[in-house]
Image (cartoon, rainbow, N blue to C red):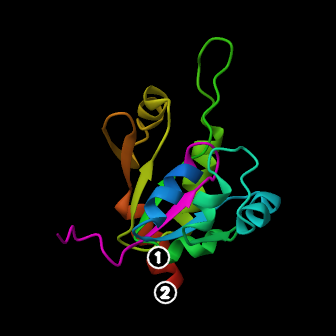
Amino acid sequence: MNSGFEGQKVCVLGLGYVGLPLAVEFAKRHRVIGLDIDQSKIEELRKNYDRMREVTTEELAGVHIDYTTDPARMREADYIIVCVPTPIDKHNNPDLTLVENASRIVGKHMARGATVAYESPRTSACLSWSRNPGCAVRRTSPSVTARSASTRATRNTSSRAS
C-alpha cells in the first residue's frame, strides 16, 4: 500500500534518548538524516555505538542513517522532527531555550514546503510555547505536531533566491 510517504526524506534533529530511537525506526523504511550538534556523538553513531544505550549496536548497524552536524542538510528533508531536551526547573516550569534555538535553526535551513514536527515528553510545555503567533500547533497524543510559519519560511527561502 502506498502511503504517499515513499521516497520522502526525514531529518531527525537531536539524537538523544527520544531522537535516536525515532531515527532508527524511520530508517527501517525511509531515508533519514540524523542531525546533532555533538560531533563526538556523531562520530560514535557512525561506528554504530550509542553512548546512551537506547539503541543496540546491531540495530544501528541494521539501518542507514546519514549522520551529520551540518544544519544546512535539513534543506534536503521533506519532514523535520525536532527532538531536543525540554528540562524543567524545581517548580516544573519548562526551559524551552533549546526548543526555541532549534526552531530558529530549522527556520533558517528548512526547505520550502517541509513539515516540521516537535517530539517532546512535555507536550504542555510546547503548547505554552506555541502561543507564539508564528507557529500553528495542534496537539496529538503523546506528542505535539507543529507546522512552521509559512510566511517566515517563505521569506527566508525567497530572500536567498534573490
Would you place residue 114 above or below residue 19 in this image? below
The residue lying furthest to the bottom in this view is 162
Element under disc 2 = helix
Which secondary structure lies at badge 1? helix
Say which residue appears at 52% left-offset and 58% top-offset: 23
For disc 2, the marked residue is 161
- Looking at this view, is 71 or 129 the one in front? 71
Vertical arrangement, residue 98 with respect to residue 113, above or below = above
Q: Residue at x 38, y 40 (%)?
A: 144
Residue 94 shown left or right of residue 57 in the figure: left
- At horizontal 54% and vertical 50% (from top left) the residue drawn is 21
Q: Residue furthest left?
A: 1
> Is 162 placed above or below 26 here?
below
Find residue 157 and name its label.
1
Q: Position of residue 108 (x, y in %)?
A: 56, 66
| The N terminus lies in quadrant | bottom left
Highlighted range, magenta: 1-19
Q: CA distance from mark 2 to mark 1?
A: 6 Å
Query: Residues at badges 2 and 1 in contact (C-beta under 8 Å)?
Result: yes
The image shows residue 154, relative to residue 94, as above or below, that is below
The type of residue carrying mark 1 is Thr
The spot of residue 61 in percent (x, y) is 62, 67
Towards the viewer: 3 or 35: 3
Residue 100 picture location, percent across and down: 58, 45
For the stretch drawn in magenta, the main secondary structure is: loop
Q: Is residue 10 magenta?
A: yes
Whether residue 91 is in magenta: the answer is no
Q: Is residue 135 left or right of residue 40?
A: left
Count residues near mark 2 (Cα–Cα under 10 Å), then give few for <14, some for 14-19, many for 20+.
few
